[in-house]
Image: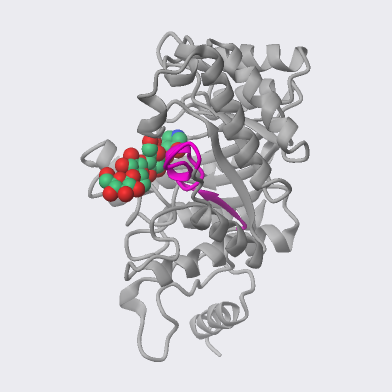
Protein backbone atom coordinates (compact mmCIF):
# COMPACT_ATOMS: atom_id res chain seq x y z
CA UNK A 1 0.00 0.00 0.00
CA UNK A 2 1.39 3.39 -0.96
CA UNK A 3 2.24 5.85 1.81
CA UNK A 4 -0.73 8.15 1.08
CA UNK A 5 -3.24 5.30 0.94
CA UNK A 6 -1.92 3.93 4.21
CA UNK A 7 -2.42 7.33 5.85
CA UNK A 8 -5.99 7.59 4.59
CA UNK A 9 -6.79 4.06 5.74
CA UNK A 10 -5.35 4.82 9.18
CA UNK A 11 -7.46 7.96 9.64
CA UNK A 12 -10.63 6.15 8.58
CA UNK A 13 -9.97 3.29 10.98
CA UNK A 14 -9.33 5.67 13.86
CA UNK A 15 -12.48 7.59 13.07
CA UNK A 16 -14.52 4.41 13.06
CA UNK A 17 -13.16 3.10 16.36
CA UNK A 18 -12.89 6.44 18.12
CA UNK A 19 -9.16 6.01 18.69
CA UNK A 20 -6.59 8.76 18.98
CA UNK A 21 -5.49 10.47 15.78
CA UNK A 22 -4.35 13.91 14.83
CA UNK A 23 -7.42 16.17 14.81
CA UNK A 24 -9.16 16.34 11.44
CA UNK A 25 -12.39 18.28 11.89
CA UNK A 26 -15.03 17.44 9.35
CA UNK A 27 -16.92 19.88 7.18
CA UNK A 28 -20.47 19.56 5.82
CA UNK A 29 -19.15 19.57 2.26
CA UNK A 30 -17.13 16.46 3.03
CA UNK A 31 -20.24 14.38 3.60
CA UNK A 32 -21.54 11.86 1.02
CA UNK A 33 -24.22 9.22 1.59
CA UNK A 34 -21.44 6.78 2.51
CA UNK A 35 -19.50 9.02 4.88
CA UNK A 36 -20.43 9.97 8.44
CA UNK A 37 -22.65 13.02 9.03
CA UNK A 38 -20.81 16.29 9.70
CA UNK A 39 -20.99 16.10 13.48
CA UNK A 40 -19.27 12.71 13.64
CA UNK A 41 -15.74 13.60 14.71
CA UNK A 42 -12.75 12.27 12.84
CA UNK A 43 -10.87 12.58 16.12
CA UNK A 44 -11.35 11.41 19.66
CA UNK A 45 -13.92 13.71 21.29
CA UNK A 46 -12.59 16.05 23.97
CA UNK A 47 -14.27 14.28 26.89
CA UNK A 48 -13.03 10.89 25.71
CA UNK A 49 -9.45 12.13 25.63
CA UNK A 50 -9.85 13.46 29.16
CA UNK A 51 -11.48 10.24 30.36
CA UNK A 52 -9.20 7.83 28.51
CA UNK A 53 -6.07 9.60 29.68
CA UNK A 54 -7.35 10.20 33.21
CA UNK A 55 -6.69 13.92 33.00
CA UNK A 56 -7.53 16.02 36.06
CA UNK A 57 -9.18 18.77 34.04
CA UNK A 58 -12.83 18.11 33.12
CA UNK A 59 -14.17 19.76 29.98
CA UNK A 60 -17.56 21.44 29.86
CA UNK A 61 -20.01 23.68 28.06
CA UNK A 62 -22.89 25.93 29.01
CA UNK A 63 -26.20 24.54 27.79
CA UNK A 64 -28.80 27.09 26.78
CA UNK A 65 -31.81 27.68 24.56
CA UNK A 66 -30.98 24.87 22.11
CA UNK A 67 -30.96 22.26 24.87
CA UNK A 68 -33.85 19.87 24.12
CA UNK A 69 -35.82 22.52 22.27
CA UNK A 70 -38.05 22.59 19.21
CA UNK A 71 -35.32 24.38 17.24
CA UNK A 72 -34.27 22.45 14.13
CA UNK A 73 -30.67 22.42 15.35
CA UNK A 74 -31.48 21.00 18.76
CA UNK A 75 -30.84 17.33 17.96
CA UNK A 76 -27.42 18.08 16.54
CA UNK A 77 -26.70 20.32 19.52
CA UNK A 78 -27.52 17.53 21.97
CA UNK A 79 -25.33 15.10 20.06
CA UNK A 80 -22.32 17.40 20.19
CA UNK A 81 -22.92 18.36 23.83
CA UNK A 82 -23.00 14.72 24.98
CA UNK A 83 -20.18 13.65 22.70
CA UNK A 84 -17.61 16.33 23.51
CA UNK A 85 -18.18 17.45 27.10
CA UNK A 86 -18.36 15.87 30.54
CA UNK A 87 -19.55 18.98 32.38
CA UNK A 88 -22.73 20.96 31.75
CA UNK A 89 -23.51 24.42 33.12
CA UNK A 90 -27.09 25.67 32.73
CA UNK A 91 -26.54 29.00 30.96
CA UNK A 92 -29.61 30.77 32.37
CA UNK A 93 -31.90 28.14 33.84
CA UNK A 94 -30.72 28.28 37.46
CA UNK A 95 -30.73 32.08 37.65
CA UNK A 96 -33.10 33.86 40.01
CA UNK A 97 -35.40 35.27 37.31
CA UNK A 98 -35.64 31.90 35.55
CA UNK A 99 -36.46 30.00 38.72
CA UNK A 100 -38.72 32.41 40.56
CA UNK A 101 -41.70 33.92 38.68
CA UNK A 102 -43.01 34.97 42.09
CA UNK A 103 -41.84 34.68 45.66
CA UNK A 104 -43.75 31.47 46.20
CA UNK A 105 -43.42 29.74 42.80
CA UNK A 106 -40.34 27.82 41.70
CA UNK A 107 -39.84 26.68 38.10
CA UNK A 108 -37.52 23.73 38.37
CA UNK A 109 -38.66 21.68 35.38
CA UNK A 110 -36.03 22.79 32.87
CA UNK A 111 -32.98 22.92 35.16
CA UNK A 112 -34.06 19.60 36.65
CA UNK A 113 -34.19 18.14 33.15
CA UNK A 114 -30.64 19.36 32.51
CA UNK A 115 -29.38 17.76 35.72
CA UNK A 116 -31.13 14.47 34.90
CA UNK A 117 -29.90 14.45 31.30
CA UNK A 118 -26.36 15.24 32.42
CA UNK A 119 -26.39 12.36 34.90
CA UNK A 120 -27.63 9.96 32.24
CA UNK A 121 -24.77 11.06 30.01
CA UNK A 122 -22.17 10.77 32.78
CA UNK A 123 -21.67 14.51 32.93
CA UNK A 124 -21.09 16.72 35.95
CA UNK A 125 -23.16 19.88 36.46
CA UNK A 126 -21.88 23.31 37.56
CA UNK A 127 -24.58 25.25 39.35
CA UNK A 128 -24.86 28.84 38.08
CA UNK A 129 -25.76 31.08 39.94
CA UNK A 130 -27.16 31.77 43.41
CA UNK A 131 -26.45 35.47 44.05
CA UNK A 132 -25.95 37.96 41.21
CA UNK A 133 -27.00 41.56 40.57
CA UNK A 134 -28.38 40.64 37.13
CA UNK A 135 -31.37 38.61 35.93
CA UNK A 136 -33.46 39.30 39.01
CA UNK A 137 -37.25 39.29 38.62
CA UNK A 138 -39.30 42.48 38.78
CA UNK A 139 -41.28 41.32 41.79
CA UNK A 140 -37.96 41.29 43.66
CA UNK A 141 -36.26 44.42 42.37
CA UNK A 142 -39.37 46.62 42.44
CA UNK A 143 -40.43 45.59 45.93
CA UNK A 144 -39.80 47.93 48.85
CA UNK A 145 -38.00 45.62 51.21
CA UNK A 146 -36.28 46.51 54.45
CA UNK A 147 -32.68 45.43 54.94
CA UNK A 148 -33.79 42.52 57.08
CA UNK A 149 -36.35 41.43 54.50
CA UNK A 150 -33.79 41.63 51.70
CA UNK A 151 -31.42 39.45 53.66
CA UNK A 152 -34.20 36.96 54.31
CA UNK A 153 -35.04 36.91 50.58
CA UNK A 154 -31.45 36.12 49.69
CA UNK A 155 -31.10 33.46 52.36
CA UNK A 156 -34.39 31.76 51.54
CA UNK A 157 -33.45 31.67 47.84
CA UNK A 158 -30.12 30.04 48.59
CA UNK A 159 -31.64 27.55 51.02
CA UNK A 160 -34.32 26.54 48.54
CA UNK A 161 -32.19 26.25 45.40
CA UNK A 162 -29.00 24.85 46.94
CA UNK A 163 -31.23 22.50 48.94
CA UNK A 164 -33.02 21.35 45.80
CA UNK A 165 -29.78 20.34 44.11
CA UNK A 166 -27.98 19.09 47.21
CA UNK A 167 -25.52 16.37 46.30
CA UNK A 168 -26.16 16.68 42.56
CA UNK A 169 -23.69 19.37 41.52
CA UNK A 170 -19.93 19.51 41.06
CA UNK A 171 -19.78 23.21 42.02
CA UNK A 172 -21.99 26.19 42.82
CA UNK A 173 -21.29 29.73 41.69
CA UNK A 174 -22.49 31.26 44.94
CA UNK A 175 -21.61 34.91 44.28
CA UNK A 176 -21.11 36.28 40.78
CA UNK A 177 -19.43 39.51 39.65
CA UNK A 178 -19.36 41.38 42.96
CA UNK A 179 -16.74 43.89 41.77
CA UNK A 180 -16.76 46.68 39.21
CA UNK A 181 -14.16 47.08 36.47
CA UNK A 182 -11.58 49.85 36.28
CA UNK A 183 -10.77 50.84 39.82
CA UNK A 184 -12.65 47.99 41.39
CA UNK A 185 -14.99 48.61 44.23
CA UNK A 186 -18.04 46.65 45.32
CA UNK A 187 -20.42 46.62 42.38
CA UNK A 188 -23.67 48.48 43.04
CA UNK A 189 -26.74 46.31 42.66
CA UNK A 190 -29.80 44.96 44.36
CA UNK A 191 -27.97 42.93 47.03
CA UNK A 192 -24.94 45.15 47.59
CA UNK A 193 -26.99 48.36 47.79
CA UNK A 194 -29.22 46.98 50.51
CA UNK A 195 -26.92 44.64 52.39
CA UNK A 196 -23.41 46.02 51.83
CA UNK A 197 -20.35 43.80 51.57
CA UNK A 198 -21.63 41.34 54.16
CA UNK A 199 -23.97 39.80 51.59
CA UNK A 200 -21.02 37.92 50.10
CA UNK A 201 -20.05 36.20 53.31
CA UNK A 202 -23.68 35.53 54.24
CA UNK A 203 -24.31 33.93 50.86
CA UNK A 204 -21.42 31.49 51.22
CA UNK A 205 -22.43 30.54 54.74
CA UNK A 206 -26.03 29.95 53.62
CA UNK A 207 -24.96 27.82 50.67
CA UNK A 208 -22.78 25.73 52.94
CA UNK A 209 -25.65 25.29 55.39
CA UNK A 210 -27.85 24.02 52.56
CA UNK A 211 -25.27 21.76 50.90
CA UNK A 212 -21.98 21.25 52.72
CA UNK A 213 -20.62 18.75 50.19
CA UNK A 214 -20.63 20.85 47.03
CA UNK A 215 -17.60 23.11 46.40
CA UNK A 216 -18.62 26.78 46.56
CA UNK A 217 -17.20 29.28 44.07
CA UNK A 218 -16.80 33.01 43.67
CA UNK A 219 -17.12 33.70 39.90
CA UNK A 220 -16.11 36.81 37.93
CA UNK A 221 -14.75 38.16 34.64
CA UNK A 222 -11.66 40.27 33.92
CA UNK A 223 -9.90 38.66 36.86
CA UNK A 224 -8.03 36.04 34.85
CA UNK A 225 -4.69 37.81 34.71
CA UNK A 226 -2.96 40.02 37.27
CA UNK A 227 -4.60 43.42 37.63
CA UNK A 228 -6.58 45.75 39.84
CA UNK A 229 -9.83 43.80 39.67
CA UNK A 230 -8.07 40.52 40.25
CA UNK A 231 -6.34 42.14 43.27
CA UNK A 232 -9.72 43.11 44.72
CA UNK A 233 -11.10 39.60 44.34
CA UNK A 234 -7.88 38.12 45.72
CA UNK A 235 -8.12 40.36 48.81
CA UNK A 236 -11.78 39.44 49.27
CA UNK A 237 -11.11 35.71 49.09
CA UNK A 238 -8.02 35.92 51.28
CA UNK A 239 -10.11 37.69 53.90
CA UNK A 240 -12.97 35.18 53.64
CA UNK A 241 -10.59 32.23 53.89
CA UNK A 242 -8.79 33.77 56.87
CA UNK A 243 -12.08 34.09 58.70
CA UNK A 244 -13.20 30.55 57.96
CA UNK A 245 -15.96 31.43 55.49
CA UNK A 246 -16.75 28.33 53.40
CA UNK A 247 -15.44 29.36 49.98
CA UNK A 248 -13.65 26.66 48.04
CA UNK A 249 -12.89 27.99 44.60
CA UNK A 250 -12.49 30.84 42.17
CA UNK A 251 -14.29 30.81 38.83
CA UNK A 252 -12.40 32.61 36.09
CA UNK A 253 -15.09 33.35 33.51
CA UNK A 254 -12.65 33.99 30.65
CA UNK A 255 -14.76 36.06 28.26
CA UNK A 256 -11.90 37.11 26.02
CA UNK A 257 -11.21 39.06 22.83
CA UNK A 258 -9.04 37.27 20.28
CA UNK A 259 -5.51 38.60 20.35
CA UNK A 260 -6.07 40.68 23.48
CA UNK A 261 -5.83 38.13 26.25
CA UNK A 262 -3.60 38.39 29.34
CA UNK A 263 -0.12 36.96 28.86
CA UNK A 264 0.56 33.37 29.82
CA UNK A 265 2.90 34.69 32.53
CA UNK A 266 0.17 36.88 33.98
CA UNK A 267 -2.43 34.08 33.90
CA UNK A 268 0.02 31.64 35.47
CA UNK A 269 1.04 34.00 38.28
CA UNK A 270 -2.55 34.93 38.99
CA UNK A 271 -3.74 31.34 39.09
CA UNK A 272 -0.83 30.51 41.40
CA UNK A 273 -1.71 33.16 43.96
CA UNK A 274 -5.34 32.03 44.17
CA UNK A 275 -4.21 28.42 44.46
CA UNK A 276 -1.89 29.44 47.29
CA UNK A 277 -4.97 30.53 49.24
CA UNK A 278 -6.08 26.90 49.12
CA UNK A 279 -8.69 27.54 46.43
CA UNK A 280 -9.61 25.38 43.47
CA UNK A 281 -9.67 27.15 40.11
CA UNK A 282 -12.13 26.59 37.29
CA UNK A 283 -12.40 28.23 33.89
CA UNK A 284 -16.16 28.73 33.95
CA UNK A 285 -17.35 30.64 30.87
CA UNK A 286 -14.67 30.74 28.23
CA UNK A 287 -15.28 32.28 24.84
CA UNK A 288 -12.97 34.26 22.57
CA UNK A 289 -14.79 36.71 20.36
CA UNK A 290 -13.67 37.97 16.97
CA UNK A 291 -15.03 40.62 14.60
CA UNK A 292 -17.67 38.88 12.47
CA UNK A 293 -17.50 37.30 10.04
CA UNK A 294 -14.33 35.75 11.38
CA UNK A 295 -11.30 35.35 9.13
CA UNK A 296 -8.85 32.46 8.97
CA UNK A 297 -6.23 34.67 10.62
CA UNK A 298 -8.60 35.57 13.46
CA UNK A 299 -9.58 31.94 13.99
CA UNK A 300 -5.90 31.03 14.16
CA UNK A 301 -5.37 33.65 16.86
CA UNK A 302 -8.50 32.45 18.63
CA UNK A 303 -7.14 28.90 18.57
CA UNK A 304 -3.86 30.06 20.12
CA UNK A 305 -5.79 31.86 22.85
CA UNK A 306 -7.90 28.80 23.71
CA UNK A 307 -4.81 26.60 23.75
CA UNK A 308 -2.83 28.96 25.97
CA UNK A 309 -5.60 29.24 28.56
CA UNK A 310 -6.21 25.50 28.66
CA UNK A 311 -2.49 24.95 28.99
CA UNK A 312 -2.27 27.26 32.00
CA UNK A 313 -5.13 25.30 33.56
CA UNK A 314 -3.45 21.97 32.81
CA UNK A 315 -0.22 23.23 34.36
CA UNK A 316 -1.87 24.56 37.51
CA UNK A 317 -2.61 21.65 39.84
CA UNK A 318 -5.51 23.48 41.47
CA UNK A 319 -7.28 23.99 38.13
CA UNK A 320 -9.67 21.12 37.45
CA UNK A 321 -12.32 22.33 35.02
CA UNK A 322 -12.44 24.12 31.67
CA UNK A 323 -15.93 25.20 30.59
CA UNK A 324 -16.83 27.05 27.39
CA UNK A 325 -19.83 29.38 27.32
CA UNK A 326 -21.85 27.60 24.68
CA UNK A 327 -21.52 24.82 22.14
CA UNK A 328 -21.93 26.53 18.78
CA UNK A 329 -21.54 30.00 17.29
CA UNK A 330 -25.19 29.58 16.34
CA UNK A 331 -26.19 30.31 19.94
CA UNK A 332 -24.06 32.71 21.95
CA UNK A 333 -24.75 35.80 24.08
CA UNK A 334 -22.07 37.81 22.29
CA UNK A 335 -23.64 39.18 19.06
CA UNK A 336 -26.53 40.79 20.90
CA UNK A 337 -24.25 42.29 23.56
CA UNK A 338 -21.35 43.25 21.27
CA UNK A 339 -22.79 43.90 17.79
CA UNK A 340 -20.32 43.00 15.06
CA UNK A 341 -18.52 40.47 17.26
CA UNK A 342 -19.03 36.77 17.88
CA UNK A 343 -17.89 33.43 16.42
CA UNK A 344 -16.35 32.87 19.83
CA UNK A 345 -16.85 29.15 20.44
CA UNK A 346 -15.30 25.82 19.42
CA UNK A 347 -17.94 24.83 16.83
CA UNK A 348 -19.25 27.07 14.08
CA UNK A 349 -22.90 27.67 13.22
CA UNK A 350 -23.05 24.31 11.38
CA UNK A 351 -21.39 22.44 14.25
CA UNK A 352 -18.16 22.13 12.30
CA UNK A 353 -15.12 22.03 14.57
CA UNK A 354 -13.01 25.20 14.31
CA UNK A 355 -9.24 25.63 14.66
CA UNK A 356 -9.82 26.36 18.35
CA UNK A 357 -11.35 22.88 18.73
CA UNK A 358 -8.39 21.33 16.98
CA UNK A 359 -5.97 23.26 19.17
CA UNK A 360 -7.44 22.06 22.44
CA UNK A 361 -8.04 18.55 21.13
CA UNK A 362 -4.36 18.34 20.20
CA UNK A 363 -3.23 19.77 23.51
CA UNK A 364 -5.34 17.31 25.50
CA UNK A 365 -4.12 14.43 23.33
CA UNK A 366 -0.46 15.19 23.53
CA UNK A 367 0.15 16.65 26.95
O1 LIG B 1 -36.09 33.87 28.37
C1 LIG B 1 -36.40 35.15 27.83
C2 LIG B 1 -37.47 35.03 26.77
O2 LIG B 1 -38.65 34.55 27.39
C3 LIG B 1 -37.68 36.40 26.14
O3 LIG B 1 -38.59 36.28 25.09
C4 LIG B 1 -36.38 36.95 25.59
C5 LIG B 1 -36.54 38.35 24.99
O4 LIG B 1 -35.36 39.09 25.15
O5 LIG B 1 -35.45 37.01 26.63
C6 LIG B 1 -35.16 35.76 27.22
O6 LIG B 1 -34.24 35.96 28.25
C7 LIG B 1 -32.92 36.20 27.83
C8 LIG B 1 -32.04 35.11 28.42
O7 LIG B 1 -30.68 35.38 28.16
C9 LIG B 1 -32.37 33.71 27.88
O8 LIG B 1 -32.14 33.66 26.52
C10 LIG B 1 -32.49 37.56 28.34
O9 LIG B 1 -33.21 38.57 27.67
C11 LIG B 1 -31.01 37.75 28.13
O10 LIG B 1 -30.60 38.95 28.80
C12 LIG B 1 -30.25 36.59 28.72
O11 LIG B 1 -28.88 36.80 28.49
C13 LIG B 1 -28.02 36.02 29.27
C14 LIG B 1 -27.15 36.91 30.15
O12 LIG B 1 -26.23 36.12 30.87
C15 LIG B 1 -27.99 37.70 31.14
O13 LIG B 1 -27.26 38.66 31.76
C16 LIG B 1 -27.15 35.20 28.34
O14 LIG B 1 -27.95 34.26 27.62
C17 LIG B 1 -26.07 34.46 29.15
O15 LIG B 1 -25.16 33.86 28.26
C18 LIG B 1 -25.33 35.46 30.01
O16 LIG B 1 -24.38 34.73 30.79
C19 LIG B 1 -23.56 35.51 31.64
C20 LIG B 1 -23.29 34.68 32.89
O17 LIG B 1 -24.49 34.26 33.47
C21 LIG B 1 -22.44 35.45 33.89
N1 LIG B 1 -21.22 35.92 33.25
C22 LIG B 1 -21.40 36.68 32.02
C23 LIG B 1 -22.21 35.89 31.01
C24 LIG B 1 -22.35 36.65 29.71
O18 LIG B 1 -23.08 37.81 29.89
Asked whether residue 255 is in view, the answer is no
- x%, y% of residue 68? 44, 66
Report x, y in % for residue 5. Answer: 50, 85
User: On the image, which quarter does residue 289 sit in?
Assistant: top left
Is residue 28 shown above or below 122?
Answer: below
Total count of labels: 0
- In this orientation, which residue lies closer to the viewer: 243 or 210? 210
Q: Position of residue 2 (x, y in %)?
A: 52, 87
Left or right, residue 16 beside residue 63: right
- The answer to whether 321 appears left or right of 150 in the picture is right
Q: Residue furthest front?
A: 104
Q: Which residues are magenta?
A: 86-104
Image location of residue 367, percent across then percent down: 67, 51
Asked if residue 51 is positioned above or below residue 189 in the image, the reply reads below
Left or right, residue 25 beside residue 319 = left
Examine the structure image and report whether residue 2 is included in the region drawn in magenta: no
**Foreground of the two, 326 or 226:** 326
* Residue occupying the point 43% across, 16% down: 180
Note whether 69 is above or below 355 in the view shown. below
For the question of whether residue 191 can be seen, the reply is: yes
Of 144 and 57, the residue lying toward us: 144
Residue drawn at 76 percent across, 12 percent down: 243
Q: Residue at x 55, y 62 (%)?
A: 84
91 in the magenta segment: yes
Residue drawn at x 35%, y 68% as measured from the top left: 70
Q: Which quadrant of the picture is home to ligand 1?
A: top left
Rendering quarter of residue 9: bottom right
* Quadrant assignment for the N terminus: bottom right
Amino acid sequence: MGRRLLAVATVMTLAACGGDSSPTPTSPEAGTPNTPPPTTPMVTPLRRIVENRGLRVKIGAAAGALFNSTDAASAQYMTVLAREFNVLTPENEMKFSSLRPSRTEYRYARPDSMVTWAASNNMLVRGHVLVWHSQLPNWLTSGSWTTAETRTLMLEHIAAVAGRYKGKLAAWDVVNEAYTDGTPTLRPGFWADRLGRSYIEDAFRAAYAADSATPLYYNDYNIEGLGAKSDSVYNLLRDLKARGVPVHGIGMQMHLIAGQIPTVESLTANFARFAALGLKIQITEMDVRVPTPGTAAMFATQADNYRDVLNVCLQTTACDMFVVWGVTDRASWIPSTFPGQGDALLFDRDFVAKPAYTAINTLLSTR
